[in-house]
């Protein structure tokens, strides 16, 4: 059951990510990135992270991608020009990315038994979801970092407003 | 019953595609999108390890990554708009003010 869910949404995420890579129009890339994020939300849910699944849909697929699509449409971004770009990117970058993937896959597959398998559903306690445990940690021991992030977001809003003004 | 290794390999695939898109793409908005893809891949490993160790600290980390990514997206897109205003282009090859 869970392996079927994993295969369906994992394949969907990989295909949408490849679509992001191969599409030339930015709006197509943005919409395939939304598909990646929604599939990742399902995978978070299958790993027992219900709060993060909801936050992924609301924050990433909702807010951040709407911002991206908005900017693509505001700047009227057309199709990407076919330029050769940097030679270093093709010579060293693509084999480098493939090498990183091969190394990671080798390490993970070698330690497959030590890493174990997943159990479906909430794993910390059967009665409640993990939102309670998450908020308990977030609002007691990690209260200061949580408040600092609100200041960070405030600064980010001010920075965005200042940067996007007409006269810079 | 899915091995945790499969989730980690999926995250590695997404991260590698993000690196490739970051290097190949020439549009600055798409480059920014591939950074978001890499952040999402890392978030998936955090959630998978959090599930593996039966602790919420990994999920807390993902929460903070999400917050910072949202702030980063707001500031980054504002920078892209300012860049487009001054250079009238989104192609990173033509943004070469500091070259030479």
Image (spheres, coloured by chain):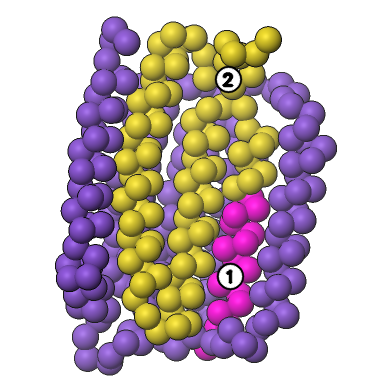
Chain colours: A purple, B yellow
What residue does disc 2 label?
Answer: B91
Q: Position of residue A106 (x, y in %)?
A: 74, 71
**N-terminal-most mark, 2 or 1:** 1
**What is the span of residues highlighted in magenta in the rendered image?**
B1-17
Is B6 rendered above or below residue A118?
above
Report the chain holding disc 2. Answer: B
Membership of A47 in magenta stretch: no
Membership of B8 in magenta stretch: yes
Q: CA distance from mark 2 to mark 1?
A: 33 Å
Q: Position of residue A40 (x, y in %)?
A: 45, 62
At horizontal 17% and vertical 71% (from top left) the residue drawn is A140
At horizontal 28% and vertical 35% (from top left) the residue drawn is A156
Is B7 rendered above or below residue B52?
above
| Residue sitting at the far bottom | A126
Report the chain holding disc 1. Answer: B
Nearest to the observer: residue B41 or residue A36? B41
- Quick one: label 2, few (<14), some, or many (20+) residues within 10 Å? some
Task: Please indicate, yes or no, whether residue B47 appears anywhere in the rendered image.
Answer: yes
The circle on residue B8 is 1
């Amino acid at each position: 059951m869970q392996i079927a869910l994993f295969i369906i949404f994992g394949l969907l995420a990989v295909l949408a990510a490849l679509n992001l890579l191969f599409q030339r129009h930015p709006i197509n890339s943005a919409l395939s990135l939304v598909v990646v994020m929604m599939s990742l939300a399902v995978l978070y849910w299958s790993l027992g992270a219900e709060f993060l699944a909801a936050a992924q849909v609301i924050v990433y697929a909702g807010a951040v991608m709407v911002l991206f699509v908005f900017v693509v449409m505001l700047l009227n971004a057309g199709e990407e020009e076919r330029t050769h770009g940097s030679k270093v990117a093709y010579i060293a970058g693509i084999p480098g990315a493939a090498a990183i993937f091969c190394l990671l896959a080798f390490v993970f597959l070698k330690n497959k038994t030590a890493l174990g398998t997943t159990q479906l559903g909430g794993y910390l306690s059967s009665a409640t979801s993990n939102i309670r445990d998450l908020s308990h940690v977030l609002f007691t021991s990690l209260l200061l970092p949580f408040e600092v992030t609100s200041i960070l977001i405030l600064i980010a809003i001010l920075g965005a407003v200042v940067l996007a003004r007409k006269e810079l | 019953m899915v091995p945790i290794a499969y989730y980690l390999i999926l995250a590695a695939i997404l991260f590698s595609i993000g690196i490739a898109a970051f290097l190949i793409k020439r549009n600055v908005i798409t480059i920014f999108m591939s950074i978001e893809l890499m952040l999402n891949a890392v978030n998936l490993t955090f959630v998978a390890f959090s599930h593996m160790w039966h602790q919420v600290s990994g999920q807390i980390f993902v929460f903070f990554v999400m917050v910072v990514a949202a702030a980063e997206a707001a500031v980054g897109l504002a920078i892209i708009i300012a860049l487009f205003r001054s250079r009238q282009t989104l192609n990173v090859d033509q943004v070469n003010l500091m070259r030479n």
